[in-house]
Image: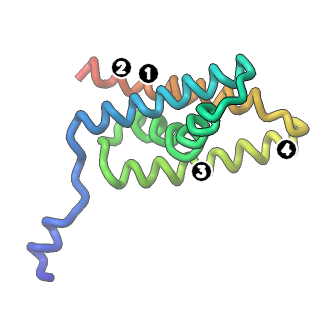
Amino acid sequence: MNAEEASSHRLEAWPEAAGWVLDGLAAAAAAATGLLMVVGVDHGLRVVAAAVLFAFGFGWAVVRAFGAPASSLAALGAVALSISATMLLGEVAVTLLGWAWRVPAVAMCGGTLLGIAVTLSHRERA
């Protein structure tokens, strides 16, 4: 592979619509997880929404709030950030809060919604 071919394979931003879809997915997962936890519903939907939120949504909201375009690199970074933040949240819930996980989990849902709101406000200014 020569230099010209290598430069054509670099990571490029995805279409704007892809960013909108993933922003909506993260917000929907956060809203559904938070609402179902607050109400106390133990349904299969909560498990799926929580998996999306804690494995992707929180990190996506943070990455996008800081102005990253939707891309493969942003998505990979979002997964890494979400899993890391979830691990830290779990450590805090176990060591400092005596296994009380609902309040930090709802706070993570709120943080995700806040990050998506910041992302949307950046779009409106542009």
The secondary structure type at the circle numbered 4 is helix
The residue singled out by tag 3 in the image is: 83
Disc 3 residue type? Answer: Ile
Q: Are marks 3 and 1 in contact (CB under 8 Å)?
A: no
Q: Is residue 30 left or right of residue 66?
A: right
Label 1 Cα crowd, 10 Å radius (few <14 / some 14-19 / many 20+)? some
Label 2 Cα crowd, 10 Å radius (few <14 / some 14-19 / many 20+)? few
The residue singled out by tag 1 in the image is: 117
Q: Are marks 1 and 4 in contact (CB under 8 Å)?
A: no
The vertical placement of 13 against 120, above or below, is below
User: Quick one: 11 or 32, which is closer to the camera?
Assistant: 32
The secondary structure type at the circle numbered 3 is helix
Label 3 Cα crowd, 10 Å radius (few <14 / some 14-19 / many 20+)? some
Disc 2 residue type? Answer: Ser
Residue depicted at 33% across the width and 33% down the height: 21
Decide which of tag 4 and tag 3 comes sooner along the chain: 3
The residue singled out by tag 2 in the image is: 121
